[in-house]
Amino acid sequence: MKIILVRHGRPDENDSTNPGDPPLNNDGRRQADAIADLLSLEAIDRIVASPLQRARQTAEPLAQRLARPVDVVDGWAEADRFGARYRSIETLRSLGQAEWKRFLTDPIRYLGGDPDRFQAEVLGALRTIAAEGHARQKVAIFTHGMPINLVLSQALALNGFVHFLPGYGSVTRLRLRSDGSIGIISINESGHHALATPMALTGP
């Protein structure tokens, strides 16, 4: 089975209506369209998304083009899903070296999650997808930075948590083998944004 992990597009970090679960901003919507341009050319069998708004909205253009539903799965949510305000990596870096070091030391707990529970939920969601599908299936999963990091850590058989920062709208491709191991095909593909529009990676 092939798994395509897509990090959501850039959200509106200044959204006042729902700051803990903001929608995409204009750049994020362009990134979602670029992802649809890329993946609509592939034989995607299933589309899965985190319940958070930024992930679901990133999945919508692809779902519309392929006329497929988006299966919302709680296990693919970000560790900050119950937080009061979304904060981007850029914002966290701007808080200074001490705060950035706190984040890197224990990112899941920093975002408000419990590391053991978070790992169980993400890897459980991945195992469920494998069990529900078949060897030739290709599944696109619209998720977040921490779940992608966690799956990559598992694929690399690391004892700790890999500090990889996937870009907004990036694509990471994996292969789930029959023995349960995870093969890495690509990490952080982002060239589809440059092809779509020169404004796709512009900040808010």
Image (spheres, rainbow, N blue to C red):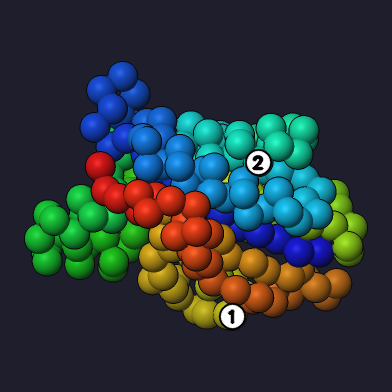
Callout 2 amino acid? Leu
- The mark closer to the camera, 2 or 1, is 2
Residue at 47 percent across and 47 percent down: it is 31
User: Is residue 178 rendered to the left or right of residue 56?
Assistant: right
Residue under circle 1?
Answer: 157
Point out which mark residue 117 bears. none
Q: How crowded is mark 1: few (under 14 residues within 10 Å), some or many (20 or more)?
A: few
Residue 63 in which image quadrant: top right
The percent position of residue 169, horizontal first and vertical second, equals 48, 53
Q: Where is residue 53 in the image (x, y as percent from the top left)?
A: 48, 32
Where does label 2 land, which residue?
62
Q: Residue at x 52, y 43 (%)?
A: 32
Q: Are marks 2 and 1 in contact (CB under 8 Å)?
A: no
Residue at 73%, 75% in the rendered image: 181
The numbered mark, 2 or 1, whose residue comes first in the sequence reads: 2
Q: Inspect this view and state whether residue 50 appears.
A: no
Count of picture labels:
2
Element under disc 1: loop
Considering every residue shown, the one lying at the far top of the view is 17
| Alpha carbon separation for disc pair 2 and 1 | 32 Å
Q: Which amino acid does label 1 sit on?
A: Ala
Task: Give left or right: position of 121 versus 3.
Answer: left
Q: What element carries label 2?
A: helix
101 vs 8: above or below:
below
Mark 2 surroundings within 10 Å by alpha-carbon count, few (fewer than 14), some (14 through 19), many (20 or more): many
- Which one is in front, 146 or 113? 146
Q: Provide residue 204's location: percent of width, then percent of height.
A: 25, 42
